[in-house]
Amino acid sequence: MDCTPSLLEAIQFVIDPARKAKREQARARELAQRAAHEAQARWIAEQEEAIAANHPAVFPRDDTFPRAGVKEMVAALALLRFAPSTSPISRVRDWVTPLYPETDKAATIVASTIQSGLLAIHPDSPRRAFVWEPQSYEHAVQQAGGDLNAVASPELTDQFYPLEASLFAPEDRAPGLQSRPWTTILPENSSRPA
């Protein structure tokens, strides 16, 4: 079989060491990018598992009403009454009508309802609503010296950003409300702010 000049050129193109090295480098870059993407996806999945484990969509309380002050009770009722949605209560930062004019005060108010046990952080809250150690995937890679196999798993701390978290109210019953959830003390047909 005789080789035509164009076939010989094509063969030289394929077996040319410089071109072969470029193809191998491109493939190595592609594999490295894929490995980095998969490592980051695993890290994110670990974050979501930690949120679900630490913030389940149930209230771990007995049948007693939480011991909370009047300020926390009023704040919880305000959150339930004025929230654009209550299943779960959407992130306060996204509300069109602010809960409170000062953002710092609003964060303190939301945090107090969680700390008192009247409301809880919903497991569907975004990952950015929590403080992590290391604080980001990029920091974890940097701490591992760029070794994707040595990247530390994300650790969920007990700190969170109250205005970034979605919340929910308990479904358990409160004493004195004749087997009704405590959230039903809100008027059913009350008008919401425009």
Image (cartoon, grey):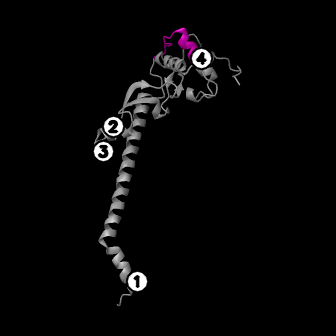
Determine contact: label 3, label 1, CB under 8 Å: no
Of the residues shown, which amino acid type is indicated by label 2? Answer: Ser
Of labels 3 and 1, earlier in sequence is 1
CA gap, disc 1 to disc 4?
A: 80 Å
- Point out the frontmost of discs 1 and 4: 1
CA gap, disc 2 to disc 1?
A: 55 Å
Crowding at dot 4, Cα within 10 Å, few <14 / some 14-19 / many 20+, comes out as many
- Point out the frontmost of discs 4 and 2: 2
Q: Which residue is identified by label 3?
A: 146
Of the residues shown, which amino acid type is indicated by label 3? Answer: Gly
Q: Residue at x 35, y 79 (%)?
A: 11
CA gap, disc 3 to disc 2?
A: 14 Å
Of labels 4 and 2, earlier in sequence is 4
State yes or no: residue 102 in magenta.
no
Q: In the rendered view, would you say 8 is above or below 188?
A: below
Q: Which residue is identified by label 2?
A: 153
Residue 108, horizontal then vertical, whole percent: 50, 18
Q: Which residues are magenta?
A: 62-78
CA gap, disc 4 to disc 2?
A: 38 Å
Mark 2 residue element: loop
Please name whichever residue, 92 or 55, is drawn nearer the observer in this view of the structure: 92
Residue 61 in view of the camera: yes
Q: Which mark is residue 77?
A: 4
Q: Which mark is residue 50?
A: none
CA gap, disc 3 to disc 1?
A: 45 Å
Q: Which mark is residue 6?
A: 1
Q: Residue at x 39, y 36 (%)?
A: 136
Q: Identify the image quadrant of the C terminus.
A: top right
